[in-house]
Amino acid sequence: MPRINTTTEDLLTIPEDIGRMIIEAGAVIACPLLGTDKFIEFCKKRGASINRERLFRLERLRLFAPVFRVLTPQDEVEPLSIPPKKDNDWLAKGWAWDTTQVERTYQVPDYADQTQEGYYSIFQIDHLQIVLSSMTLSVHLDSYLESSASKDIDWEKNGKRWLEFTRSHAASLKTHVYRRAVALLCQFISNRYYPHTQGNQRTIQVPQGRHSWDGWTTVSAFDWDWREVVRKWQPREVERIFNLTPSKLRHAYVGMAIAQAHCDPLERWYQLTQFVNSSERERVKGDALRAETLRSGAHMLRLLYKDLYGEELQHPNEVTGTIITHVPELKVREDTRRYLEFVVNRYGLNPQPVVSLIVEGASEERAVTAIFERYFGSHPGKYGIEIIVLGGVDAATGTKEDRFRAIIRLIDYLHHHQTFTYLILDNERYARKLKAEAQKAKSIHSRRYVTRPEYLKVWKRSFEFDNFSCAEIASVLTEIAAGNARFSRVEIDACQQNPESGAKLKKLYRRRTGNKLDKLKMITLLTERMLSPKSRQKIANRPVIKTLERVARRAARNPFPTMQEVWKKNQASKYFGKKRRSIVGSSGK
């Protein structure tokens, strides 16, 4: 952990009557204060070893105290209103008092006393944890067990030494106001900045007007509008009240940032967890949950610093250590969506396909899926491969007025997002011309062509005729006909020789059976036979297998970038399309 070189001038101090000012400003709406039992529960969830008895004892020792206390009045009166009403000012009547000043003396009740209540800020947990650590002794009793075998242990001497050590710590903690002051500053500015800390980098949680009551206090804020708070916010007033300077506020921020990083077991994963909804982050426990609270405070101090002094301090999780290269780059982080993309790439969580395999119809999709599952051993999705069904050649080749443009621009878009795209079509209508045009098409994103020739596969005839023998097709058609007709290899071969082989095959089946050919069923049965150990043709020699092997290899060799610089290099490479030649004297457009 880095050392912070400070002087007493750099340390925050506690403003006089800041507890009263928090009440009067109503700085409890976005981030409410917690009553004693709720505060204890809050701290326990964050790993603090505290109970009601110990909390009150620490207050009697003047080591830790709430923001303010209230006493049940003898007469029946309305609860303390926050912000106070003129005719309901408990502070003025002595039924409530500010407990933020270290030197202020007041009678602390017994922990079992239910006639009083203390109210705490969630940001006080940092100070409380320091006090608890100083007041908690950890002893390895096994060492004494071993020592007692050879010599007597002077327990009284050891006990006095421990007590003296603790007394010395307590004395320094009583006069140490910096940590108390940081928590109070965070609470005082919470109405303005706390909502910014409760989000997933894309949205924030803004509280609506609310009403709360617990028997002693009531917070009436039905008309409270956070946007109005933002419009009327005066950071210079905060600067005046806390006597802030750039060095004081920076020191407070760095201290809290270091505290959250030091206790957070998930610190190294923060780039990812910051994009998780805050409601889900609240489900972590112990130190990780305490770090969430401290990080909220640090973020608020960082936002205040920017409002006051126009400078954005380092991110709370980048305060410790030395960063040589920001991953991803700082400029990229201004675009939250792009930032998230690079982060999930780093953790291998990006569900974006590494390869998009565009096929004509549902029958090809089913065949490809079956081949991947049974021949390659996994569903194509496990390879990061997405299968896109066009619904026919015409969907790819477009209309006369817009020939090829749509599919080429889709490929260009996917390549721009580093998803390799393979297009597989039957040799019908304009498929060959589409391949030729795609090879010449220029990317609108980079100085390269849209794609490479090997990423566009047009079967010599069609998927079924290129990958299955006429005998296999005849056998399957006979099976589908279910006794209504028998098909010969010679008939199928005649269809294959026709330029429109697919259409010819469908006509043959309809003429012989009187029914429409179920192409999905035909391809399914053909694929089953291809994958069968009884198949006469070696599966590795089937053209579709060779094509899908290339697709699988490309998927395995396409790790998504974690930095903008890497992405740019990928786009400028020859992987997605050949580079275009630069013409001397051209503008490069």
Image (cartoon, helix red, strand yellow):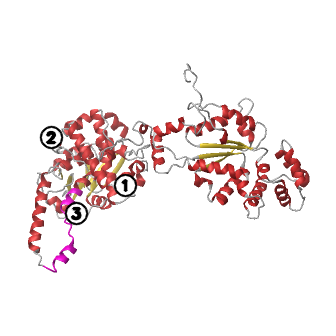
Mark linked to residue 9: 2
N-term mark: 1 or 2: 2
Q: In terms of secondary structure, where does tag 2 sit? A: helix
- Marks 1 and 2 sit apart, C-alpha to C-alpha, by 34 Å
Q: Secondary structure at mark 1?
A: loop
At a point 32% along the width and 49% down the height, the residue shown is 295
Mark toward the viewer: 1 or 3: 1
Q: Earlier in the sequence, mark 1 or mark 3?
A: 3
Residue 410, position as x, y percentages in the image: 63, 38
Q: Secondary structure at mark 3?
A: loop
Q: Is residue 423 left or right of residue 478?
A: left
- Which amino acid, by three-letter code, is at mark 1? Leu
Alpha carbon distance from label 1 to label 3: 39 Å
Rendered image quadrant of residue 538: bottom right
Query: Does residue 333 appear left or right of residue 161 in this picture?
Result: right
- Residue drawn at (15%, 44%) of the image: 16
Asked which quadrant contains residue 313, the reply is top left
Q: Is residue 436 above or below residue 482?
A: above
Task: Please name whichever residue, 259 or 368, is drawn nearer the observer in this view of the structure.
Answer: 368
Q: Is residue 294 visible?
A: yes
Other-residue count near label 2 (Cα within 10 Å), few / some / many at <14 / 14–19 / ≥20: few
Q: Nearer the viewer, residue 44 or 56?
A: 44
**Residue 108 drawn in magenta:** no
Dot 2 amino acid type? Glu
Residue 553 location (% of width, % of height)? 60, 50
Residue 135 is inside the magenta segment: yes
Residue for point 62% across, 56% down: 379
Name the foreground residue: 45 vs 420. 420
The residue at the far top in this view is 585
Q: Is residue 386 above or below residue 525?
A: above
The type of residue carrying mark 3 is Gln
Instruction: Give the magenta range.
Output: 129-150
